[in-house]
Amino acid sequence: MQVSHETIYLSLYIQGRGLLRKELVKHLRRGHLIRQPKKQVRPGEGKIKDMVMISQRPAEAADRAVPGHWEGDLLLGTPTTAIGTLVERSTRFVMLFKLPSGINAESARLGLTQKILTLPENLRRSLAWDQGREMKQHVRFTIDTGVQVYFCDPKSPWQRGTNENTNGLLRQYFPSGKTVAHYTQDHLDMVAAQLNGRPRETLGWKSPAKKLAQFLEESSAAGVASTA
């Protein structure tokens, strides 16, 4: 007989009358007491001008064939603090960034722009984001970086599933309801490095860091060959 993972989860939650027992919660990477997916909707969603929807994103992003297509979001601490999260769809490589001046459109644009520009040009192809008001300056971001932003449909977190999953893993480091304002960029880079160093089954048990390095090596070799 075979039992699915969902059946196991449900049996554990049912034993606790809908809540997972505290002695089990402490062993989880994600501290979900209730087996019920939730999407926190931020005020102002759906009021962004000049949005390009995710349905118009290049097909190469959907099939994960070409690295350089990113998914992003804000990971909330307290309602007034957050950090920015970015995940590359092909390699699952993670980058985290601080918001210079709280949760607002200018702060998100500045932090996101600075982080994206640390990447080589061939890894700056597109960015998928939800319709949170922190992306109201997306046009300026695209002008500054050359990266087109594609917006997900409302209440459709699966359209950024890789980022959603990564944000869940990040809760091990940044619990819900606690401020994240005091974390330095060096600390965020350290956390990202830990995630990027973990082997992933979906990557053939290679780590995101190794997959990204492999892509960059191959791109460099191809560039040398083309100029020879």
Image: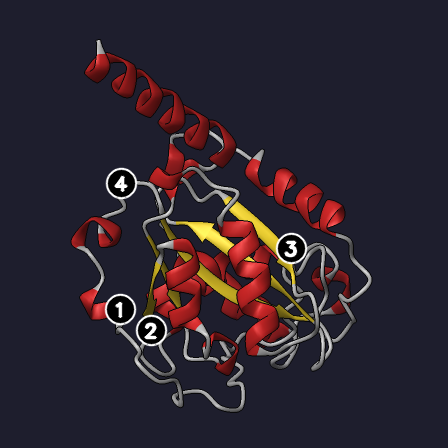
What residue would you read off at disc 1? 54
Above-or-below relation of 196 to 112: above
What residue would you read off at disc 2? 152
What residue would you read off at disc 4? 66
Which of pointers 3 and 4 indicates the residue nearer the eye? 4
At 26% from the left and 69% from the top, the residue drawn is: 54
Element at badge 2? loop
> Do the residues bearing badges 3 and 2 touch, measured as CB atoms within 8 Å?
no
| Separation (CA) of disc 3 from disc 4 | 30 Å
Residue 115, image x and y in percent?
55, 51
Callout 1 amino acid? Ile
Residue 43, image x and y in percent?
53, 91
Callout 3 amino acid? Arg
Above-or-below relation of 6 to 39: above
* Image position of 5 (left or right of 112): left
| Separation (CA) of disc 3 from disc 1 | 30 Å
Upstream in sequence: badge 1 or badge 2: 1
Q: Is residue 180 visible?
A: yes
> Do the residues bearing badges 2 and 4 touch, measured as CB atoms within 8 Å?
no
Element at badge 3? loop
Label 1 neighbour load within 10 Å: few <14, some 14-19, many 20+:
some
> Do the residues bearing badges 1 and 2 touch, measured as CB atoms within 8 Å?
yes
Q: Nearer the viewer, residue 177 or 35?
A: 177
Which of pointers 3 and 1 indicates the residue nearer the eye? 1
Upstream in sequence: badge 3 or badge 1: 3
